[in-house]
Amino acid sequence: MRRLLSQICLGMFMLVVIFNLTACESADNGKELSNAIPEQKEDQSEGEKIKIGFAMDTLEEERWIKDRDLFKESVEALGAEVMVMASNGDDSLQIWHAETMLSQNIDVLVIVPHNAESTAAIVKKAHSVGVKVMSYDRLVRNAELDMYVSYDNELVGMLQARAITNLVPKGKYVYIGGAETDHNAHLVKGGVFSVLQPLIDKGDITVVFDQWTKDWVPEHAKENMKLALKANNNKIDAVIAANDATAGAVIEALQEEGLAGKIPVAGQDADLAAAQRIVIGTQTMTVYKPIRTLAQTAAEIAVKLAKGEDVIETRKVNNGRIEVPSTLLSPIAVEGSNIDETIIADGFHSREDVYRYVEE
C-alpha cells in the first residue's frame, strides 16, 4: 500500500515539474506565448465584477509603488478589481505574468512595459483571447494597442532643458539618459535636444557626454557621471538626467568631487528624495507628473474598455505600427520657487517630509 501511495505521489510531483518547466519555457520565449490560454474569452456574467490586469515593469522605485496603489484604489472605487504583477525588469517574467493574468479571465490588460519592443507579443496574445490592452505611462512599440495613457514625455524633456538653459545658456552639458529599451526615454531625450539643438548649433552649448542608463539602474548612471567628470577634468557646467533616481546618482558622483550644489542638475518624477535635494540646493528641478491624475484616468478608461464603451482620445501616437488612440496629460516643472504650490499643495509629499533636512 505504501509503495502504491509513493508511486502516486511521485507521479503527481512529476506532473507539477513538467507543468512548471513548460511555463518557464513559455516565459523565456518573447515571440511565441503559451497556447494554454483559451482561444476565446468567456462573456462576462451579469453582475460579475470587471477584472483588470496590471502588468508592471518594476516596484523597486518609489514612483511605481505610488502608481500601483493609486491605480488599485481608482479601479476599486469604480466597482472593479485589479490583479497586479511586477517583473522588476525581467522581460520573460513580464510575458509570463501577462499569460497568467490572461488565464485568470481578466477583462482588460494594462501594461507598463520594461522592453517596448518585446511586449508587443503580449498585445498579440491578449487580442487572440479577446482582451483589450492599454499601455500605461510607457508605450508598447509595434503592436496594435487599444489605448495609451501617459504624460507628454517630449514636453517633460523640454521642461527640463528650458529650466537648465535659463540658468546655464552657455557651457558644457552632460546628458544622462534612461534605459534605451524604454520608448519614453527616447521621447524625453527628444524633448531635451529639441531645446538644446539651436544652442548647440550656435556653439553656445557643447554636449560633452551623452549616455543611456541600462535598465534605469542608478548605479549605472553614477558610473556614467564619473566617466563624464573624468573625461572633462571635472569641468562640467550642467547635467540633465532622465529621472530623479538617475539625478540622485549624478549628484552622488558630484558630491564625491565636492561639486554637489555647484552644477545644476535636472530630473523628473518628483520623488521625495528629489524634492528634498531641491530645497537644500543640490538638485535644480524636477518634473511633476501628478500620478493620481494618471492612475484615475487610466482606471476610468480601462473600465470603459472592459464595458465596450466609447473612449474619448485626445491624441494619436505612432508606435511604429499604428496610430495609437492616446490620452496625454500635461507635466509641471518644479523648482524651489514653486515646490510648495505644486507637489506639496497636491498632497503628493508633505511639507514636513520635503523640508526635513533643511536647517532652520
Image (spheres, rainbow, N blue to C red):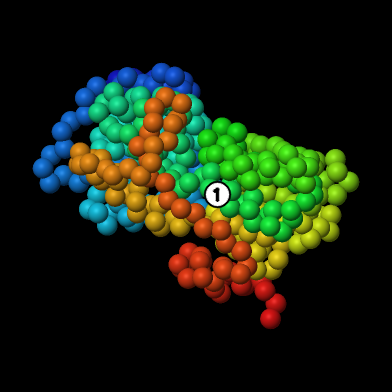
Residue 157 x, y percent position in the rendering: 58, 47
- The answer to which quarter of the image holds residue 200 is top right
Q: Is residue 10 left or right of residue 224?
A: left
Residue matched to label 1:
156
Q: In this view, does 90 lie to the left or right of 243?
A: left
Viewer-nearest residue: 326 or 71: 326
Q: In this view, does 243 lie to the left or right of 294?
A: right
In the rendered image, the residue lying farthest to the bottom is 360
Residue 193 x, y percent position in the rendering: 64, 41
* Screen quadrant of the C terminus: bottom right
**Residue 133 vertical position relative to residue 174 in the rendered view, above or below:** above
**Residue 211 vertical position relative to residue 12 in the rendered view, above or below:** below
Please tell me which residue is depicted at 63% across the width and 59% down the height of the picture: 285
**Residue 274 vertical position relative to residue 245 in the rendered view, above or below:** below
Residue 299 visible to the viewer: yes
Please tell me which residue is depicted at 47% across the width and 71% down the height of the picture: 345
Q: What is the crowding at mark 1: few (fewer than 14 residues within 10 Å), some, or many (at least 20)?
A: many
Residue type at mark 1? Val
